[in-house]
Image (spheres, rainbow, N blue to C red):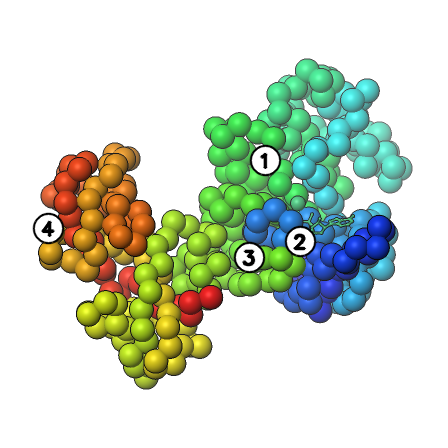
Amino acid sequence: SVSVRIENVTKIFKDLRGKADVVAVNDANFEIEPGELVTLLGPSGCGKTTTLRMIGGFELPTKGRIFLGNEDITFLPPNKRDTATVFQSYGLFPHMNVFDNVAYGLKLRKVPSKQIKEKVMNTLGLVGLRDLAQRPPSKLSGGQQQRVALARSLIVEPSVLLLDEPLSNLDALLREQMRVEIKRIQKSLGITTIYVTHDRVEAMSLSDRIIVMKNGFIRQIGSPDRIYEDPDSKFVAGFVGKVAFLPVEIMSVDGRCSVRFEDKVFEVGKFSPELKPGDKGVIMARPESLKLLESGAGMIEGRVNTNIYLGGSLESFVSTDRGEILVQIDNPAEKKVFAEGEGVSIGIIPNLVKALPDR
Ligand code: ADP
Ligand code: MG
């Protein structure tokens, strides 16, 4: 497998009716290691598909360079670069059965038919479709069509696999199964993979690293736990998980950071390096960095709105004068649980929260 590197890549779409141009991707830089699975994550319209299409060769950058290993592929057509793309819509040939759909890329490359047969059956085995080789796509479920599309890309043994929201047409259960499947196949082949999604759970569960995008800009690159626990901004914090932002004043920053929330001053576990004493900031509180206490004992008074029992944990939605705040209670069987309608106080676990700039 091979690395993928994009350097100062910008894509501007000119608007034909003379309106403002769209900067779909704005000076993006990243490098993906050989064999790594990296997700491009962000809201609709943030530039994920455009980034992927430039790597696949379906769109030319306005500026910048794209490399596979040491090879500059910026201007190569899709069939001249060692990438394979699975599009959101699968793009199967309806008049060909599963076997011929998967064999297509090898036939184009004039591979001898005996070899084609062996490779197709091996690849169908990899995606669990050996028994359906003779079926037409119209007689397949969504999940099976998805597997055919994947097999068709994998059979040409690309160095880089590009997947654009490949599971978005599947129902929730199938999506979860295919997620595990894709990761298993990707790891067993060791194929460098770029995966586009707007679904944070998908990104968190699949990725070695996540690239979070917004409005054409890369906002943060990091492992799922890093992005979740140690985000650089309110945007990333809010996009990758449930969170409450509480306004604080930054009191001191010197290797540690102490903040003032209302009349209470405490040290936080993590803080943005941009913060200075006197700044207005926020603390990012995940549901698991908060706890429920008797009225008056914590930092924010409230009342339990709804309790959602999830087995190993309980989610308590608490209404406060700072809006509704979600508190996660692990092992609820061992803890005091406050009933719906009961008055409570929310406590902050200081070493689990992060102070961020308020923007
Ligand atoms: P995402 O995949 O994250 O939803 P896209 O990369 O598809 O986002 O789009 C990024 C931005 O570029 C959007 O504002 C979109 O409208 C615009 N865009 C994408 N493709 C084209 C195109 N062919 N012509 C003009 N604008 C485009
Ligand atoms: Mg898209």
Q: Residue 234: percent from the left, percent from the top?
A: 44, 61
**Residue wearing tag 2:** 47
Q: CA distance from mark 3 to mark 4?
A: 38 Å
Type of amino acid at the residue the image marks with label 1 = Leu
Mark 3, other Cα within 10 Å: few <14 / some 14–19 / many ≥20: many
Instruction: Give the camera-side residue of 230 and 326.
Output: 326
SS category of the residue bearing label 3: strand
- The picture quadrant where one finds residue 304 is top left
Q: Is residue 161 above or below residue 285?
A: above
CA–CA distance in space, label 3 to label 2: 11 Å
| Quadrant of the rendered image containing residue 170 | top right
- The residue at which mark 1 appears reads as 167
The residue at 40%/63% (across/down) is: 230
- Ligand 1 neighbours mark 4 (CB distance < 8 Å): no
Residue type at the position of mark 4: Glu
Res 216 quadrant in image: bottom right
Indicate left or right for 79 with 40 as reference.
right
Cα distance, mark 1 to mark 2? 19 Å
Q: How many angstroms separate mark 4 from mark 1 (CA)?
A: 44 Å
Q: Where does the image place residue 2, in percent across and percent down from the top left?
A: 68, 58
Whichever of labels 1 and 3 marks the residue nearer the N terminus, that label is: 1
- Mark sitting earlier along the chain (4/2): 2
Q: What is the tally of numbered marks visible in this picture?
A: 4
Tell me if the residue at label 3 has its CB under 8 Å from ligand 1.
no
Q: Nearer the viewer, residue 138 or 27?
A: 27
The residue that disc 4 covers is 294
Residue behind mark 3: 212
Q: Considering only order in the chain, which callout, 4 or 3, is on the residue closer to the N terminus?
A: 3
Q: Which is more foreground, mark 4 or mark 1? A: 4
One can see residue 43 in this view: yes
